[in-house]
Image: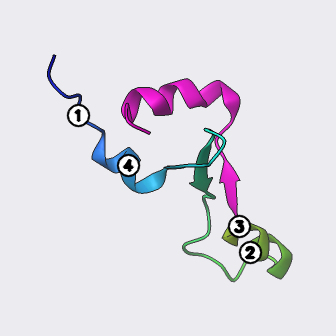
Amino acid sequence: MPKLKSNRAAAKRFKATGGGRVKRSKAYASHILTTKTRKRKRGLRKNDLVDKTNERQIHRLLPYL
């Protein structure tokens, strides 16, 4: 059976954790930052986990994750 192709856009956005969950960065942190509070911008810097309901979709895009 041939190798499966990974979705390259998804590969750049998601990484696996040691426990098998999927790590992602938060959205809305790139521009129009003057209207956002310091606290909000600080929170956007941190990574987050993909919700359990979406993990199956990510694994479909990245079969070797």
Number of other residues with Cα within 10 Å of mark 2, as a class: few under 14, some 14 to 19, many 20 or more = some
Q: Which type of secondary structure does the marked residue at label 4 adopt?
A: helix
In front of the other: 17 or 5: 17
Say if mark 1 contacts mark 4, CB within 8 Å: no
Is label 2 or label 3 in front? 3
Quarter location, residue 10:
top left
Identify the mark nearer the N-term, 2 or 1: 1
Q: Which residue is under mark 2? A: 41
Residue at image x 66%, y 41%?
Answer: 19
Q: Quadrant of the C terminus?
A: top left
Cα–Cα span, label 3 and label 1: 29 Å
Q: Is residue 35 magenta?
A: no
What sort of colour scheme is used for the picture?
A: rainbow
Residue at label 1?
Answer: 5
Mark 4 belongs to which amino acid? Ala
Residue 59: x and y in percent read 46, 30
Circle 1 SS class: loop
- Identify the mark nearer the N-term, 2 or 4: 4
Q: Earlier in the sequence, mark 3 or mark 1?
A: 1
* Residue identified by numbered label 4: 11
Q: CB under 8 Å between callouts 2 and 3?
A: no
Residue 50 in view, yes or no: yes
Residue at position x 58%, y 30% in the image:
55
User: Counting residues from the N terminus, which is met first, the one under dot 4 or under dot 3?
Assistant: 4
* Mark 4–mark 3 distance (CA, rounded to whole Å): 19 Å
